């Protein structure tokens, strides 16, 4: 495993849409492991492949309940609504209030290429939504209800 450089601020790759993963091969598995290691080293709770310069639909999340890797994640259900403070490893020093669903259902592949469905609530749901947005080239600052500088 290796630490990867986190793309910052106005890096154009952060605004591009990511491509689906057609084959969960060793390169994708290594990417997911590297992303987790990079996220932990940066004290983050989530990271998307575009943030490390790879335009693939891969995200990792750990909100304190253990690591989760999602390949080709698709949010299939959303309910509830909550406005809360968010930040981003790619936008250091910036925070803002963003409205997100309080409960989601997501379909994805795991690192073994197996399909799974997961229900998430509250902070876990928020983190997944934030990272899935990265796959579409959307940053949390695009959805601000209220902005705050650190």
Image (spheres, rainbow, N blue to C red):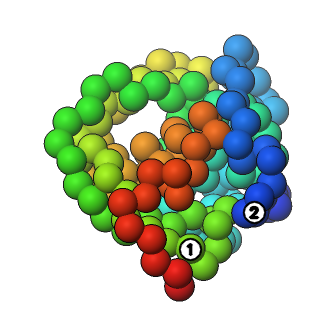
- Of residues 99 and 111, the one nearer the viewer is 99
| Residue positioned most to the bottom | 150
First of labels 2, 1 by sequence position: 2
- Taking the spot 27% from the left edge, 59% from the top edge, the residue there is 83
Q: Residue at x 32, y 48 (%)?
A: 100
| Percent of width and height locating residue 40 | 61, 66
The percent coordinates of residue 24 (x first, y second) are: 69, 22
Q: Is residue 17 left or right of residue 125?
A: right
Q: 16 or 23: which is nearer to us? A: 16
Q: Quadrant of the N terminus?
A: bottom right
Q: How many marks?
A: 2
Q: Please state which of residues 61 and 84 is positioned toward the viewer in this rendering.
A: 84
Q: Are marks 2 and 1 in contact (CB under 8 Å)?
A: no
Q: Visible in this render: residue 111?
A: no
Relative vertical location of residue 69 with respect to residue 10 in this rendering, above or below: above
* Residue underneath mark 2: 8
Left or right: 50 as drawn, with respect to 94:
right
Q: Position of residue 80 (x, y in %)?
A: 17, 42
Please tell me whether mark 1 sits on a helix, a strand or a loop: strand
- For the residue pair 11 and 73, the one nearer the viewer reads as 11
Q: Residues within 10 Å of mark 1 (few under 14, many from 20)?
A: some
- As drawn, which residue projects farthest toward the top? 22
Q: How far across and how far down the image is residue 93, in percent?
A: 60, 79
Residue identifier under label 1:
94
Give the quarter of the image for residue 137. top right
Residue at (57% x, 25% y) in the render? 72
Residue furthest out toward the left = 80
User: Rounded to the nearest whole Å, what is the CA distance between mark 2 and mark 1?
Assistant: 12 Å
Report the residue at 58% width, 43% height from top: 138
Q: Which mark is residue 11?
A: none
Dot 2 falls on a residue whose secondary structure is loop
């Amino acid at each position: 495993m290796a630490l990867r450089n986190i793309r910052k601020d106005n890096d154009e790759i952060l605004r591009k849409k990511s491509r689906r993963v057609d084959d969960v091969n060793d390169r994708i598995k290594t990417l997911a492991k590297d992303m987790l290691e990079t996220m932990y080293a940066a004290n983050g709770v989530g990271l998307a492949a575009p943030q490390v310069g790879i335009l693939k639909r891969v995200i990792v999340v750990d909100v304190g309940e253990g690591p989760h890797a999602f390949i080709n994640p698709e949010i299939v259900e959303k309910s509830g609504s909550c406005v809360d403070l968010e930040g981003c490893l790619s936008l250091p020093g910036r925070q803002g209030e963003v409205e997100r669903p309080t409960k989601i259902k997501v379909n994805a592949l795991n690192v073994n290429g197996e399909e799974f469905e997961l229900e998430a609530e509250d902070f876990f749901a928020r983190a997944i939504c934030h990272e899935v947005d990265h796959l579409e080239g959307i940053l949390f600052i695009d959805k601000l209800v209220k902005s705050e500088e650190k």
